[in-house]
Image: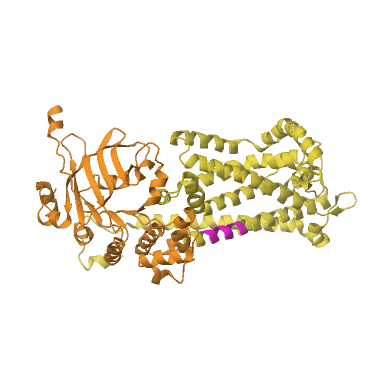
Chain colours: A yellow, B orange
């Protein structure tokens, strides 16, 4: 390669071609990067294949009835997971609604000059510490603090507004409401932290443009900052929702593990992840196959949610930011 | 200290021939403890273009941004003096800066369209002011005035950010003039543009002054001679140990460039300024 320049006698000065060792290092790093990327893909493929393999007998046996039926009876050998699919989506949507509104509000509060920059950093660290609390601790907190707190309120709501589907039953102990509330707190740091980053990425000139048009602070935030940050906020919501769908331990402790479909916030329910966690330890061979099928369903749901979320996010990027 | 304070140069106040829309009397402008601008009287005449020129750090942008209280976004900013607008000091306590900015619009150095459609960008101010009339008509009118209509009329739903730099700047001008503000402040609006886009924006400014009052900060002295009716020359005072900007001379553009009264002005416009 250096012959190229020797002909032109370009040997003056201190410029020179990279050494063979440098070229070799370049190649090695590239190989490592490519290998790492492939290993990830292989790992995902392997896990899918393995679960699919183990679930195959159940898939063949129950077919689509598995996701439309409502019984899980080991002694009769009847397995289906519609209530769990419902519980998974319902609890996650409730959590996303609560955690999303709360998380975005926190992000606005921390980035739009409501408090001093240093205070905002401290505040943000505290919010992110929520993510460091183990799931099982949330579960215990839910059982010993949240459920006793919710009981009187739930009782009152059921007594006075019992005709309303959301309050159709009383809270006897574990149930949808405490599970969704804890789930909301658990996804809060994810939503808040990523939304904060989305707001921070907005260039100062956008803020200037908004105030230069004569917006009040709220108009600037709602009409300019939020749309500008929308693709980042959507990413935050997708990640938060993904986390809510897969959350296991706290839900297994709080949701009541009851095989039923109800709109009521106070009735016990079940989720796919919680079903897996609570049934695996004592499952026989046939039930394990059914559980593997359930795991496959959970994987499919999270996969679809992520793809759909990404698609919506890309759409907003194109629409608002004009990127191809 | 007192001796130098007495020797401080203060420009002779410029007597405007026509109506003055904004009468800006800067006593002192601070950023925290830093004295950024002192003693500058800058009257902005109605339906004329007033150019602000001077070296970097002379405070010309700071003064311009004081005219619609944009500097209030900076928490340590402090203004001493008065900015009389239709007989009202916009720095009076009871005045809400939001209201000031609705009447005195601004175009910035960097194009800063919102991440929304071209149409929504121009309609932003109209909707903000709860305009009841025909928004489409107003948007079209503003885009035509900003010399952008032909290029974007078939893609009004596309994002404002999908346009080129020069188009984005004209979009920002359209956004600023859609609500027909009384005064338009332009802070180096062409510094991020190529010569062709610059020429378009300059032509636009000359058209705008038929209806609006324009105050323009520019780094480009040729631009000032091309478009400004009146020119204010600012300089930096380093005698106090700080870097304080102040007005050196203000007058009709021809006079400033052809027969400057002050030595500093003469040196600057002939390029002798270090």
Q: Quadrant of the N terminus of chain B?
A: top left
Residue A182, image x, y percentages: 68, 39
Q: Quadrant of residue B235?
A: top left
Q: In this rendering, is residue B179 above or below A171?
A: below
Above or below residue A19? Residue A195 is above
Q: Which residue is drawn at 83% across and 60% down?
A: A61
Report the predominant secondary structure element of the magenta stretch. helix
Work out whether residue A126 can be spotted.
yes
Tell which residue pokes out farthest to the right in this image: A76
Q: Kindly indicate the quadrant of the structure image that contains residue A129.
A: top right
State which quadrant residue B32 falls in. Answer: top left
As rendered, which of A166 and A215 lies closer to the eye?
A215
Q: Is residue B208 left or right of residue A147?
A: left
Q: Is residue B109 left or right of residue B261?
A: right
**Is residue A314 part of the magenta span, yes or no?**
yes
* First to last magenta residue range: A308-316
């Amino acid at each position: 390669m250096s012959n190229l320049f020797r002909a032109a006698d370009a040997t003056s000065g201190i410029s020179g071609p990279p050494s063979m060792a440098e070229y070799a290092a370049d190649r090695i790093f590239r190989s490592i990067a490519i290998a790492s990327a492939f290993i990830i893909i292989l790992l995902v493929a392997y896990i899918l294949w393995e679960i699919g393999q183990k679930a195959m007998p159940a898939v063949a046996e129950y077919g689509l009835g598995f996701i439309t039926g409502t019984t899980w009876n080991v002694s009769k050998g009847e397995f289906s997971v519609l209530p769990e699919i419902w519980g998974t989506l319902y609890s996650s949507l409730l959590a996303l609604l609560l955690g999303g509104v709360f998380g975005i509000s926190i992000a606005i509060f921390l980035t739009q000059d409501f408090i001093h920059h240093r205070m905002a950093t401290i505040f943000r660290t505290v919010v992110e510490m929520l993510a460091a609390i183990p799931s099982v601790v949330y579960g215990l907190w839910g059982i010993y603090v949240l459920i006793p707190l919710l009981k009187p309120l739930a009782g009152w709501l059921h007594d006075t507004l019992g005709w309303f589907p959301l309050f159709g039953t009383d809270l006897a102990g574990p149930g949808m409401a405490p599970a969704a509330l804890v789930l909301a707190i658990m996804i809060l740091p994810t939503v808040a932290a990523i939304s904060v980053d989305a707001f921070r990425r907005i260039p100062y000139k956008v803020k200037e443009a908004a105030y230069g048009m004569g917006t009040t602070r709220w108009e600037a935030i709602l009409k300019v900052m939020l749309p500008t940050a929308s693709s980042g906020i959507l990413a935050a919501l997708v990640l938060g929702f993904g986390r809510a769908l897969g959350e296991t331990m706290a839900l297994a402790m709080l949701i009541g593990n009851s095989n039923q479909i109800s709109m009521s916030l106070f009735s016990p329910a079940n989720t796919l992840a919680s079903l897996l966690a609570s049934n695996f330890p004592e499952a026989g061979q046939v039930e394990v196959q059914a559980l593997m099928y359930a795991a496959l369903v959970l994987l499919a749901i999270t996969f679809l949610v992520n793809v759909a979320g990404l698609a919506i996010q890309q759409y907003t990027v194109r629409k608002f930011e004009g990127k191809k | 200290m007192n001796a130098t304070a007495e020797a401080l140069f203060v420009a002779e106040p410029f007597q405007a021939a026509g109506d003055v829309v904004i009468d800006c009397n800067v006593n002192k402008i601070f950023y925290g403890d830093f004295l950024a601008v002192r003693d500058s009287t800058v009257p902005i005449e109605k339906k004329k273009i007033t150019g602000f020129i001077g070296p970097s750090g002379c405070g010309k942008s700071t003064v311009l941004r004081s005219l619609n209280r944009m500097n209030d976004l900076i928490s340590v900013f402090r203004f001493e003096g008065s900015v009389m607008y239709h007989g009202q000091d916009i720095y009076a306590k009871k005045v809400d800066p939001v209201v000031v900015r609705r009447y005195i619009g601004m175009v910035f150095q960097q194009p800063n369209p919102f991440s929304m459609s071209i149409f929504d960008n121009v309609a932003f101010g109209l909707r903000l002011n709860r305009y009841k009339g025909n928004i489409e008509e107003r948007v079209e009118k503003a885009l035509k005035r900003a010399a952008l209509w032909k290029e974007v009329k078939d893609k009004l739903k596309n994002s404002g950010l999908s346009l080129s730099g020069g188009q984005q700047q004209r979009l920002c001008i359209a956004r600023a003039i859609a609500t027909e503000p009384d005064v338009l402040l332009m802070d180096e609006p062409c510094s991020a543009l190529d010569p062709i886009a610059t020429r378009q924006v300059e032509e636009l400014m000359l058209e705008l002054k038929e209806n609006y009052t324009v105050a323009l900060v520019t780094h480009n002295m040729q631009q000032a001679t091309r478009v400004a009716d009146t020119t204010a020359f600012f300089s930096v005072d380093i005698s106090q140990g700080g870097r304080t900007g102040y007005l050196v001379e203000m007058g009709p553009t021809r006079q400033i460039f052809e027969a400057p009264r002050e030595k500093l002005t003469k040196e600057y416009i002939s390029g002798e300024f270090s």
